[in-house]
Amino acid sequence: MGKNYIRATTLMAGLLLSACGSKLDKVRDQFIDSCSSDGANEEMCECAFDKLQAHYGEKGLIAIDSEGYPPPDFGNQLVEAAQQCKTR
């Protein structure tokens, strides 16, 4: 019984982690699609997303997406990220 419990727990943890990963992947894809459709190149959009992820974290970006509105500093963070990525 102990081994089965450990296996089940490990499986559930893996499923939960993959669910978080797939949500972040969805948010990332949507951000990059939106960013590049506004005329920016994809590499710059990926860089900006990475900088936003470093600031807000995975859970923060997923929450921003699911709640439908960004925190007050999001605009400034986005502009700063884009400027940093442009000069790379």
Image (cartoon, rainbow, N blue to C red):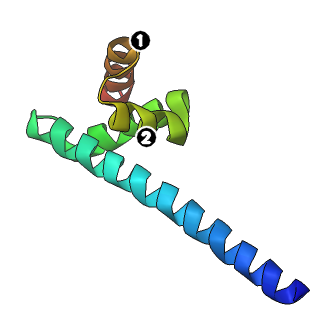
Q: CA distance from mark 2 to mark 1?
A: 16 Å
What is the number of the mark on residue 73? 1
Q: Is 48 in front, or is 29? A: 29
User: Which amino acid is tagged 2?
Assistant: Ile
Residue holding disc 2: 62
Query: What residue lies at 50% left-to-right and 55% top-to-bottom?
Result: 20
Q: Secondary structure at mark 1?
A: loop
For discs 2 and 1, the disc positioned in front in the rendered view: 2
For the residue carrying disc 2, how many other residues have a C-alpha within 10 Å: few (<14), some (14-19), or many (20+)?
A: many
Q: Quadrant of the N terminus?
A: bottom right
Position of residue 19 in the picture relative to residue 75 (left or right) = right
State the quadrant of the C terminus.
top left
Local crowd at mark 1 within 10 Å, few (<14), some, or many (≥20)?
Answer: few
- Name the residue: 32% across, 15% down: 75
Query: Which residue is drawn at the image coordinates 51% and 29% (left, top)?
Result: 56
Type of amino acid at the residue the image marks with label 1: Asp
Q: Quadrant of residue 35?
A: top left
Q: Residue at x 48, y 36 (%)?
A: 53
What percent of the width, then of the height, locates residue 5?
81, 80
Q: Earlier in the sequence, mark 2 or mark 1?
A: 2
